[in-house]
Image (tube, rainbow, N blue to C red):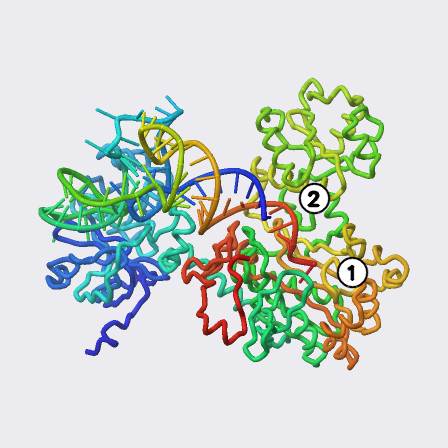
Amino acid sequence: MSQESSIKRTHYCGDLRLTDAGNAAQLNGWVKRRRDHGGVIFVDLRDRTGITQVVFDPQIDEEAHALADAIRSEYVLNVKGTIREREPGELLFQADATYQTDLANGNLSAAFRSLFSDADTKYTLSEEIEVATRVQGERWLLTDGENNRTYHIERTENGLSIYQGTVNPELDTGEIELAVDTLYILNSAQTPPFPVEDDIDVAEDIRMRYRFVDLRRPEMQKTLAMRHKAALAARNYMNEQGFLEIETPILMNSTPEGARDVLVPSRHYPGRFYALPQSPQQFKQILMMSGVDRYFQIARCFRDEDTRADRQLEFTQLDIEMSFAGVDDVLEVTEGLMKRIFEEAGGIPVQLPFLRLPYHESMARFGNDKPDTRFGMELTDLSDVMADCEFQVFTRTLESGGQVKAIAAPGGEAFSRKDIDDLTNFVATYRAKGLAWVKVTADGFSSGIVKFFTTEQLETAQERTGAKPGDIMFFVADKPKVVADALGNLRLHLGKKLNLIDHSRYNFLWIVDYPLFDWNEDENRYEPFHHLFTGATAETLPLLDTDPGKVQSQHYDLVCNGYEICSGSVRIHRSDIQQKIFDILSITPEEVKNRFGYFIDALAYGTPPHAGIAPGLDRIVMLMRNEENIREVIAFPKSQQGLCPLTHAPSVVTDDQLEELSIRVDADH
RNA sequence: GGGCUCGUGGCGCAGUUGGUCUAGCGCGCCUGCCUGUCACGCAGGAGGUCGCGGGUUCAAGUCCCGUCGGGCCCGCCA
């Protein structure tokens, strides 16, 4: 027999069940654990589907048993043998045959139960009992799920015999084992740096350095499989909806807008660089101009900005664009896509359609445009009430055009001085100068600043924030942006800290009606709120000439549980309007020609109205897996500083390589 | 660019105001014994430049400065 055919498996390690007992099987896998009892050796063999216990017994095969002595964790094995039902262990006690009826209806009488605890207190049965009939009227398997024990029960001449069980209720394959007659040790392994099992407590950098070991863990395999299923569900859905998957260049033009580009030097053109795409934005619009009608791509995107827990230097978007489409068309397709992905890949039911929330309302109620709506504690404006209070911190802020807003934290009356100091430091990171607070007690209001307010003012605050006795109200007075940042983040912080979030919920929400421009105070000019090609609503389009700040865009974001998971817009398809945008943003005709010349030309050759969106695959998988870190759902992520912990990229290159690229490195810079 | 935080055998951690620290514990690892375990058990054993460099001191895991690496955040991310 050739080596190749000898290691061919008949099943995966998660496949075998009691119904397979008696058959031959051959498995490949890694050794999770070896238990050597001197005479008999048990090995838990693992592959990506699960674990099967394999047994080496000298009475089955002396040679295999002798070989198994050398097996250690993470050795790679091929084992061949017979699948067998796990046999009863030690006889524990005998019982009267009449207890058969208990077993038949699966409901054990107190008398029968007490026989177990009488035999030994460690056999005391919990409420979590399951009875499986193996042979009608003859053999049963009793599982105590809570205590993780099983019992074999057999009908004998004298009544019932209760044996210690050898079934492992924790394993899907726990009712069988493979009695090995032939063992091939395909490879040995060094002792792994950490055990290959779930719920390990290991520093992330260690896991990343040994990612090939880390990814063997069942939870990680589950993530990889779910990510695959999500991409597959997306492909199938987009195909069914008539979209063509088209690849766009990875080496493209650098555009100074937006994020920093990742640059690639050109060998043929010294001093010139390709940029990796931040998104295939321009190409997908070109595809609409090209008559593709409906395009999608599972596209890798690159943005050379500092990372966060939910951001990575390179990430994956389900890039989508469609012609002759408006806002509702894109939202409808996207909703169907989300439903398909979450239900098919994540097993998470999704209700359609999603709610739509205007941008300004989201900012007002939650302090950001990606609200986590799984809990309340919304921001409430008290500027009108506080305008004539005695607290100068509030009144001065209001006089200079600021706001006073508040939230109420349930149970916050119990917060200590230190708790509140910590929260004050927390909001300080968002540039809030202070955090005013008033506790609502059974006898009224309590705080050092109560004296500055009338009872009526505090009662209005209580009413608007919804604070009840036992709660605390937090106030921030500052410029609107600071108030939103500080209170919005405080809300999230307290929501987590006070356990107000139901982690089984998925709250999808469209954010719509964004402004088209943002006023940049430092540079005294408008800049695009999203990007240069975002279209305006028909109603506000005339304001482009008179009051650009009031123009509303046709941009939309899809938010779920506080994460932005999709972002898109209806695009500008008329060159005259595109030109107007350039004018408002003070982009000179020369700049336009240099940077977008090809794009403007293309616009003029018959561009259909079109719109698109880009769901972020990484964040979607992160949500479905209930992870808070994007690195958990990327097979080989980079560290916060952009290093690959496995390959150590980026690396130094040879002088010859630099020479070819006409590049000189100033290492001191 | 900035703030906070972590770095001690393979892994997770302890190590008080600098002085029995000749650095301790659990897991893992190695050897031996053990035929029904599944976190097997029992007995014995090995394994540490305290991230790195410098400084203060009679004395540094401990204090100071710098540096490298991990994480969270601000800025940044159209």
Q: Quadrant of the C terminus of chain A?
A: bottom right
Q: Quadrant of the N terminus of chain A?
A: bottom left
Image quadrant in which you'd find residue A218: bottom left
Horizontal and vertical percent for residue A614? 64, 64
Horizontal and vertical percent for residue A195? 32, 51
| Element class at badge 2 | helix
Q: Nearer the viewer, residue A155 or A517?
A: A517
Horizontal and vertical percent for residue A445? 71, 21
Answer yes or no: are tags 2 and 1 on the same subunit: yes
Please, which residue is most extreme toward the right here?
A546
Sequence-wise, the earlier of marks 2 and 1 is: 2
Q: Nearer the viewer, residue A446 or A315?
A: A315
| Element class at badge 1 | loop
The amino acid type of the residue labelled 2 equals Phe
Residue under pointer 2: A366
How crowded pointer 1 is (Cα within 10 Å; few <14, some 14-19, many 20+) is rated as many
Image quadrant in which you'd find residue A402: top right
What's the chain of the residue with tag 1? A
| Label 2, label 1: how far apart the Cα atoms are | 21 Å
